[in-house]
Amino acid sequence: MDIYSVIKKPLVTEKSTVARDEGNKYIFEVDRRATKIEIRNAVEKIFKVKVLNVRTMNFVGKKKRLGRVIGSRNDWKKAVVTLAPGSSIEVFEGV
């Protein structure tokens, strides 16, 4: 899998901001088929940092209803990437 297709987007929320400030953890939405090793390699090569740990979570899309039509949101996967002390990703700085 291409390293640029593994990481879809960074997730910037209050919880991710606290995790970044306190534990040097960065949160990304990643491809559902990506493994922890692929996520680790993608983050290290794209942002040029040292990754210590990768934790992943799978989320099932919520059911949504509009009138008589019932649909659902897409399933997605979240990765929490812990960086080595002294490393940081510049994309998140100042957000």
Image (cartoon, helix red, strand yellow):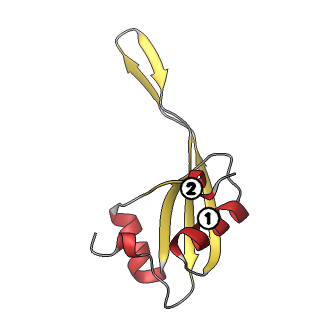
Residue 81's place in the image compared with 56, above or below, is below
**Residue 58: image location, x then y, percent:** 61, 48
**Residue 77: image location, x then y, percent:** 58, 49
Q: CA distance from mark 2 to mark 1?
A: 7 Å
Per the image, the residue denoted by label 2 is 4
Please indicate whether residue 15 sits to the left or right of residue 56 in the image. left
Per the image, the residue denoted by label 1 is 42
**Residue 89: image location, x then y, percent:** 44, 76
Question: Which residue sits at x=62%, y=58%?
Answer: 3
Q: Give the image quarter of residue 4.
A: bottom right
Q: What amino acid type should be assigned to the residue bearing mark 2?
A: Tyr
Dot placed on the residue nearer the N-terminal end, 2 or 1: 2
Please indicate whether residue 20 sits to the left or right of residue 53 in the image. left
Residue 26's place in the image compared with 7, above or below, is below
In the drawing, what numbered circle is on residue 30?
A: none
Instruction: State the residue in front, 86 or 17.
Output: 86
Instruction: State the residue in front, 64 or 83.
Output: 83
Residue 60's place in the image compared with 95, above or below, is above
Question: Which residue sits at x=68%, y=46%?
Answer: 33
Label 1 sits on a secondary structure element that is helix
Question: Which residue sits at x=33%, y=64%?
Answer: 14
Q: What amino acid type should be assigned to the residue bearing mark 1?
A: Ala
Residue 63's place in the image compared with 31, above or below, is above
Quarter of the image with the C terminus in it: bottom left
The furthest residue to the top:
68
Question: Which residue sits at x=41%, y=66%?
Answer: 16
**Residue 7: image location, x then y, percent:** 54, 56
Q: Are circles 2 and 1 on residues that touch, CB within 8 Å?
A: yes
Disc 2 crowd rating (10 Å Cα; few below 14, some 14-19, many 20+) is: few
